[in-house]
Image: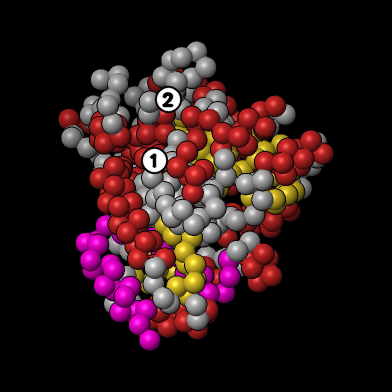
């Protein structure tokens, strides 16, 4: 079928079922290289655009199945400028960091500047300020929720080549207006990339607003079960994705592997079902925490108290499954709370089927100077929670007992 009515059908059937030996699911192609029947066939494969049957650093059918599914999910229901169904190209990587490295190195050179928001995942922040800075690519950080600041920055600094948006942002759950920022960027001919990890394609489709690239840590909601590390870079310029971006990808060596790709494909089949339960639980957890006497503040866009509540409602199907919050007792109260949890899991990462609780200041943002993260709203006592799909009463009961004095 050319058209599906919903995300679940896309996730299950976007790649079709024409697999080796009539396998129902795409097999795990656990091979480093592929054979050629003739020299001519080898020449044709090297010369062609399909590099999935040459060498697994270049491509692999297990990767392709996951890539095609993710591209179909991000493009679902969208049209290109001619009114035809939008076509996208995805490149699967060994991690989110590998995919982001490809994104930046394939599009930026010494002397260029990246403009980004001041609430970023710690790994992204360090990649920009340490690795990319060493290549001569600079980073300017502003509050991109203020569109006047965005317009002012790109009008005054001609070195800005890319705007990188993370929305919702980690861990403050701040949101950036993708449509408005992209409109400003395109007036100046700038590249726009969006980290869509927290939302997943089920909740948010940035290509709807004309962005150039979308990035995911597939480790999170796309996989959904915490079984494999991965990252993906998706682009709408098919020729560029298949040539220069692909070349950077394979030369950097950040390829995935067949088993992790298989686990990702398997996880995505239940994306819609999982996200519906994640989101329903998260909304109730946020309401519970906001009303609790021990909680000073809850960062969750589903609450009207969040400054980006209206924006999230505009560009997301639901506020999502991730939130952060402050206990009134600060860092010590937060540590005590985390230690008392009995069912919710103390772990970094997010997007798995179980509820994960972490402390950003000492974990995901440990590498960022304290004064800098405080400025960005990542305080010493901030707790981040990725709400899972357990039975809601059990999540609430665990939180209640952990919050008691």
Percent of width and height locating residue 84: 43, 15
**Position of 322 compared to 158: left or right?**
left
Number of residues whose C-alpha sits closer than 10 Å to that of mark 1, classed few (under 14), some (14–19) or many (20 or more): some
Q: Give the residue at x 23% y 66%.
A: 393
Instruction: Return the x and y of residue 83 as percentages of the image width and height.
Output: 46, 14
Quadrant location of residue 367? bottom right
Outermost residue to the top: 82
213 vs 48, nearest the viewer: 213
Q: Quadrant of the rendered structure where residue 39 is?
A: top left
Q: In the rendered view, would you say 22 is above or below 109?
A: above
Image location (x, y in percent) of residue 153:
76, 42
Pick whichever, 64 or 331, lies toward us: 331
Q: Give the residue displayed 30% in from the left and 21% down from the top.
A: 3
Query: Residue at point 53% right, 74% down?
Result: 381
| Residue 380 x/y as whole percent | 57, 74
Secondary structure of the residue carrying tag 1 is loop
- Which residue occupies the foreground of this view, 105 or 70? 70
Nearer the observer, 351 or 257: 351
**Camera-side mark, 1 or 2:** 1
Question: Relative to 330, does residue 53 appear above or below in the rendering?
Answer: above
Q: Distance between the residues labelled 1 and 2?
A: 15 Å
- Which residue position holds label 1? 317
The part of the chain drawn in magenta is: 378-405
Pointer 2: residues within 10 angstroms few (<14), some, or many (20+)? Answer: some
Query: Can you identify the residue that label 2 sits on?
Result: 78
The N terminus: image quadrant: top left
Res. 63 visible in picture: no
- Indicate whether residue 16 is drawn in magenta: no
Tell me the quarter of the image containing the C terminus.
bottom left
């Amino acid at each position: 079928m050319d058209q599906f009515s919903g995300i679940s059908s896309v996730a299950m059937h976007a790649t079709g079922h024409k697999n080796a030996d009539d396998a129902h699911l795409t097999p795990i192609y656990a091979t480093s290289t592929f054979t050629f029947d003739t020299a001519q066939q080898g020449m044709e494969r090297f010369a062609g655009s399909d590099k999935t049957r040459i060498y697994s650093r270049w491509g692999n059918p297990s990767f392709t199945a996951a890539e095609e599914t993710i591209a179909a999910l991000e493009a679902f229901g969208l049209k290109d400028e001619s009114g035809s169904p939008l076509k996208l190209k995805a490149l699967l990587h060994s991690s989110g960091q590998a995919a982001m490295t490809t994104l930046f190195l394939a599009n930026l050179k010494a002397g260029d500047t990246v403009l980004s928001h001041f609430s970023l995942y710690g790994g992204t922040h360090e990649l920009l300020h340490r690795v990319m800075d060493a290549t001569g690519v600079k980073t300017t950080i502003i509050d991109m929720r203020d569109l006047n600041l965005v317009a002012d920055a790109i009008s005054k600094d001609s070195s800005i080549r890319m705007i990188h948006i993370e929305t919702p942002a980690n861990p403050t759950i701040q949101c950036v207006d993708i449509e408005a920022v992209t409109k400003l960027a395109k007036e100046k001919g700038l590249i726009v990339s969006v980290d869509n990890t927290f939302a997943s394609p089920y909740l948010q489709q940035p290509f709807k607003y004309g962005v150039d690239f979308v990035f995911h840590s597939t480790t999170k909601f796309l996989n959904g079960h915490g079984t494999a590390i991965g990252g993906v870079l998706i682009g709408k310029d098919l020729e560029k994705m298949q040539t220069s971006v692909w070349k950077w990808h394979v030369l950097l060596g950040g390829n995935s592997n067949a088993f992790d790709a298989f686990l990702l494909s398997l996880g995505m089949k239940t994306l819609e079902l999982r996200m519906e339960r994640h989101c329903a639980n998260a909304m109730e957890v946020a309401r519970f925490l906001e009303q609790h006497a021990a909680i000073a503040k809850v960062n969750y866009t589903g609450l009207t108290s969040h400054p980006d509540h209206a924006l999230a409602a505009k560009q997301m199907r639901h506020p999502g499954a991730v939130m952060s919050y402050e206990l009134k007792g600060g860092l010590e109260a937060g540590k005590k709370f985390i230690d008392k949890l009995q069912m919710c899991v103390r772990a970094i990462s997010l997007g798995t089927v179980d509820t994960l609780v972490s402390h950003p200041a000492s974990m995901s943002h440990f590498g960022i100077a304290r004064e800098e993260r405080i400025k960005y709203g990542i305080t010493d006592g901030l707790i981040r929670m990725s709400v899972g799909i357990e039975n809601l009463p059990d999540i609430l009961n665990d939180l209640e007992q952990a919050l008691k004095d």
